[in-house]
Amino acid sequence: MTVRVRFAPSPTGYLHIGGARTALYNWMFARKHGGQFILRIEDTDQKRAVKGAVQALMDALRWLGLDWDEGPGVGGPYGPYIQSERAELYRQWAGWLLDHDHAYKCYCTADELKARRAAQKAARSDQGYDRRCRYLTPEERAARERDGLPYTIRFKAPIEGVTVIHDVIRGEITVPNSQIADAVLLKSDGLPTYHLANVVDDHFMGITHILRADEWINSAPLHINLYAAFGWENPVYAHLPLVLNPSGRGKLSKRAQAFDDHGHQVLVKVEEFRDAGYLPQAVNNFLANVGWSFGDDREKFPIEEAIPRFRLEDINPAPTRLPYDKLDWLNGQWIQDMEPLELAQALKPFLDRQGHEVGAEALLAVAPSLRVRLKKLTDADDFLRFLWDDEGNTGVITAERLAHNKLPSDAALRSLQAARDFIATVQPFDLDTLAAGLTTIGEAHTTNGKAGPFLGVLRLAVTRQDVSPPVFESIVALGRERALGRLDSAIALWHK
RNA sequence: GCCCUCAUCGUCUAGGGGACCAGGACGUAGCCCUUUCAAGGCUAAGACCGGGGUUCGAAUCCCCGUGAGGGCACCA
């Protein structure tokens, strides 16, 4: 039997990082077993549907590289993959349940239910629906039908005994059936609830394994009994550990914004990670390390290498926070492994977005040294400011600041003039030639015979930044003319 | 209130009865390297929630506490 798993988000906004983790684990599991990964949209609650959300979900999944074999955009033999387009099927099977005495019509109104729930809450108990419509006499039922009252269809859940969930990650979980609610299966608007839709779809779509978050454990007994009522075989269950807020309190939510220990807001939507300059490979790598580990003490790995080692049994059941610090480190590692050209190309859209014009050659010149410096693609902004900001910081540079204890003011001036003359004429104007010539100039002007102090002064003069890429690369990126301009204005500071 | 889940350094984790005075990673601190910032190398501090069992032996198994989390919708 081939493995078939699904990721079934509801289109209420964007892809949540916790959802991405669930999707990733499903995807890895499918790929490992040569099975299918299915995307299904659970939009049976029209009140919560958000326009454009399906597209956003797909974009985020694609950005992460989690390709689905069946689902919106790609089709498949078990479609449609959007639940609102399958309404008739759910109605049909709810009817079947009714006919076979596994369900009943409930005429309680939403308001009545709400009031009873409030009363339960006031009594500091919360048992859920009291099953009153389950025990309506035939006469009472007939009367309500005659009145044409709207109704929902509820599951006739078992009351006695226990239900056992066989969870691959947690082992056997036994739940008293008294805990299983007579859940609403079909709402009064004729659409199914999650419970019905998910069971019907999973069955007809041939889903073999359900990997979903821990928060679903409590409804698993209901689902198991629904499968039993239908006479269908249950899939294998694996409940993934919950992703918590950075504080460790509560699950990470995209609605309530999350903050870390320093009070900084934390990223939650996948698109936020993308916009913040994280690489999809790094995000996958990061997610794979949360609740699962590669083994061999290896933290950084391409997801493709994780696939053959991935086993549900190895997933750590404990709820977890996301180690955002580690994501920064991992992302830096991934950036470090990029080819300079690749990095330059990745950087371009980020610079464009900020309206910074940087030539391809300049970017390429500086890419090798940027590789080991960036944690996020957005960090490039600070390092490269000197490339687009000709006037910026001019004011903060003075002749005094351009001196150094190993390179006093007059020597600093002379060294910069020498550098100017050298840069004006050097051929070829490339990294190695510049490095050799400027190092010699530096050694000749400092009191300790080392180029270091001079290079610091040169950096300040040319980039007007205390922190910049290495100075030779910076000069190459700037180009001969602009570098000379910077030196000229630095030298002019001595004549003020 | 009822039910369910979980519990190893600050954080993410390895650990499946002796190989553990508990390993790795991030973060933190120090040193080295060094043209800034990084990266890299080395070093350091840092954990088995508590109590009972079982066993010759427990981080590992069982029980009870405690703590944290989840669920108890005509939301998923």
Image: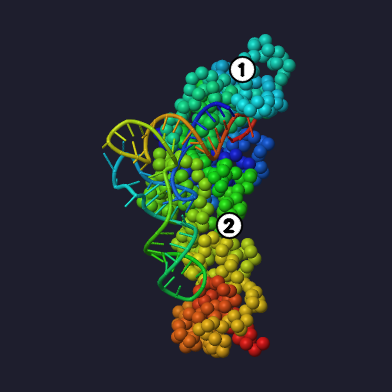
Residue type, numbered disc 2: Ala
Above or below: residue A449 compared with residue A64? below
Q: What quarter of the picture does the N terminus of chain A occupy? A: top left
x then y, percent, for residue A223: 52, 28
Nearer to the camera, A281 or A261: A261
Of the image marks 1 and 2, the number of the one nearer the N terminus: 1
Q: Residue furthest top?
A: A139
- Give neighbour class at mark 1: few <14, some 14-19, many 20+ (Cα, 10 Å): some
Q: What quarter of the picture does the C terminus of chain A occupy? A: bottom right
Q: Which mark is residue A276?
A: 2
Q: Residue at 49% of width from left, 26% of height from top?
A: A175
Let me know if residue A225 appears in the view: yes
Label 1 chain ID = A
Residue type, numbered disc 1: Arg
- For residue A378, which quarter of the picture? bottom right
Q: Residue at 43% of width from left, 37% of height from top?
A: A169
Q: Residue at 64% of width from left, 18% of height from top?
A: A133
For mark 1, what is the residue? A134
* Labels 1 & 2 near each other (Cβ < 8 A): no
Does residue A357 appear left or right of residue A406 in this picture?
Answer: right
x then y, percent, for residue A53: 63, 44
x then y, percent, for residue A434: 48, 81
